[in-house]
Every structure is written in structure tokens, then in C-alpha cells.
Image (tube, grey):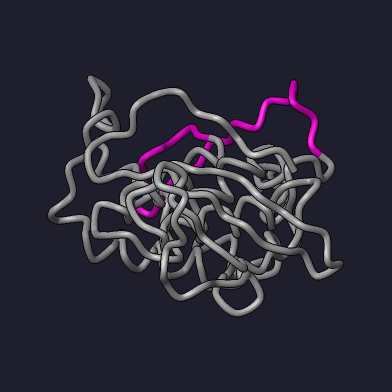
Amino acid sequence: MTTATQNQLAPSGVRMLTIVGNYPSGEAYSDTVQAGSSFEAMIRVLADRRYSDDGGDLEVSCIIDAQTGKVVDDRLLNAEHDLLTEVDAIEQVMEKVTALLPTLSFGALDSVHAVSGYDHLLAYTEYFGLVLAEAPQAFDGLTHGAGATSDEDMTLEFEDSQGLVHQFEPAVALLALAEAALQGGMTTAALQVKTLATVARSSLNLAALDALGAY
């Protein structure tokens, strides 16, 4: 595959890292990403490849600093052993957010509306708890194009245990949970879930809505 080119300057502490690897079929893969560490770069690429239509479970064979051309000497990861199942990844993110809620900065989640960012995140964790309880395998095998139609309305209305009503796309809610979890530090689960919610957005929406019979 063609290596991605990015002309913008990387923020301080962030490097352009080229990830080289192979799919189980033996097909070669190479791409360059901007990341703060080789761990972040590898997990993002492994998750992106898992959830992309043209991807698969990648094994990293080499990491190169794109600026210097030197090999980065770090432990190499592979999707089979280093990515989590979707259930485990989402559950870990939910647990992390629940623990972090008292200290989180909500930023754009807070608005002029009556429901605060805190309440939104609580509702999102409650919603995904119900989805996983009802259909724990709902998000297995998702890719960008798996049964998705881009012009369909994926917004649902969810009443939480406090009686507050929320309107959201499941993928947008999951992305918010992952970003909140990342405030507590880079973890495999948070990076993987953020990539899942972004790359397989429409498919994830359909799977979540189907799981609770809301679509």
C-alpha cells in the first residue's frame, strides 16, 4: 500500500512513524501516522486495519521514524495478541470513564441544554451496558461498509435511569466515551474503541440499534 504523506508540522513530542507489517495472508502493509509514541501508532494502525473493509488483523514487523529513517527499537505488536475483543475494549473504556467522571473536563459536551456532559457520559455508559448485556457479540467483525447506508438517520432517543432523555448516534456516544477515557492516559482499549467508533461508524450504529431492537 502507498505510504501516507503529511505535510503539516507535527506538534511537539509527536513524530511521524512508518508502520510496516503483514496480513495473515502474507500481503505487505506500510503506512505513516502521526503519533506521540510507537505504542499509540501501532494500536491505532492495528485497529484501523481490523475495522477497514480492505484490512485484516495486521502484524507489525518494523517501525521507522519517518524523519530520520531510523528503526524505532520498541516491542512490536500484532492484532491477534495485542488488540482486545470488542466487548473487552468497550467494557474497559466504560469502567475507566466511570472512575474518571468526577475529574473529567467535559469541554464541548457541556452546553446551554439542561443535560450536562457528566449526565451524557453516564447515559452513554448505561446505554452500552445494556447493548453488551443484550447482545455481547454485536460489535464483532464490524468494518466500515458492513451493511451500512450513509444517508440513514442513526439517531436514537434514550431515557436513562434518572429519567433524562438523550438523543445521540451510538457511534458518536462511544467516541465520546473513548475520548473521555483517553484523558486518563493512552490505553489499548481507549485507542481501539476510538478507532472502532470512527472507522466503522455506520456499521456500529446499525449493530447497536439492532441489539436493542431500536432500528
At horizontal 45% and vertical 65% (from top left) the residue drawn is 189
Taking 206 as reference, is 126 left or right? Answer: left
Asked which quadrant contains residue 13, the reply is top left
Specify the principal SS of the magenta part.
loop
Magenta region includes residue 157: yes
Quadrant for the C terminus in the image: top right
Residue 162 appearing in the image: no
Outermost residue, bottom direction?
81
Q: Position of residue 88 (x, y in %)?
A: 53, 73
User: Could you tell whether 172 is left or right of 86 in the image?
Assistant: left
Taking depth in this image into account, of 11 and 199 the one nearest to the observer is: 11
Task: State the image coordinates of residue 163 (x, y, percent, origin top left).
Answer: 36, 45
**For residue 53, side relative to residue 88 (left or right):** right
Per the rendered image, the range of residues in magenta is 148-168
Q: Position of residue 161 (x, y in %)?
A: 38, 54
Expressed as whole percent of the image width and height from the top left, the position of residue 26 reads 83, 67
